[in-house]
Image (spheres, rainbow, N blue to C red):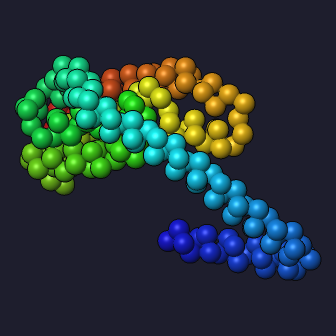
Amino acid sequence: MMGYIWGGMIITAFFFSFLTGNIETVAQSALTGAENAVEMAMGLLGMMCFWSGLLEIAKRAGLTEKLAKCIRPLTKLLFPKLNPDSPAVTAMVMNMTANFLGLSNAATPLGLAAMTELDKINSKKHIASDEMCMFVVINTASITLIPTTVITLRAAAGSADPFGIIVPVWICSILALTVGVITAKILSKGKGRRL
């Protein structure tokens, strides 16, 4: 569907540029935009490779396992119905760790694995369980130590201080996570009363 939308926008732009006599300007803008996109993609690729490599080093050194152990008491509080040794908890903890380190690309497969495991133990397959809803909230509003993607985008766009957003990101993500978790807990209790 998105291909049709983008294709329609491109055709419309070229059609109206031809009618108004601005075809040369639109063609030049398209080439400039493509060049900027490639430059930004290469910058993102380099930064993602760097941070993914750093995460791999942390994994091999056992740092992610230690961080995961630190997070486990929190998962017991947030997911009291789950067995702490279940594969779902392991995948969730690794997802939270990857998100905390700002590696959203590495966190995605772990998040999908966690949801698959949570779905296996969900008694009502057509309705998301409280644990699934809570995990989505935590995954979406996760606290990020180093917002790698945003820093990379800022650096690629020529920002004078690409790391200047770190403290505001911490504040916003902590607030978003707190509100999200509290809301999910309240709605979870309310759902039990309604049913």
Outermost residue on the right side: it is 21
State whether residue 2 appears in this view: yes
Task: Give percent across and percent down for residue 99.
Answer: 37, 35
Q: Nearer the viewer, residue 194 or 11?
A: 11
The quarter of the picture where the C terminus appears is top left
Q: Nearer the viewer, residue 144 or 40?
A: 40
| Placement of 135 over or under 44, stated as above or below | above
Q: Nearer the viewer, residue 20 or 145?
A: 145
Q: Residue at x 44, y 38 (%)?
A: 51
Task: Give percent across and percent down for residue 67.
Answer: 26, 24
Task: Give percent across and percent down for residue 57.
Answer: 33, 35
Q: Residue at x 30, y 49 (%)?
A: 109
Write down the quadrant of residue 182 in the picture.
top left
For this view, does 144 lie left or right of residue 4?
left
Task: Give percent across and percent down for residue 160.
Answer: 72, 30
Q: Nearer the viewer, residue 157 or 120?
A: 157
For this view, does 53 lie left or right of residue 76?
right
Q: Residue at x 53, y 68 (%)?
A: 2
State whether residue 77 appears in this view: no
| Placement of 15 over or under 44, stated as above or below | below
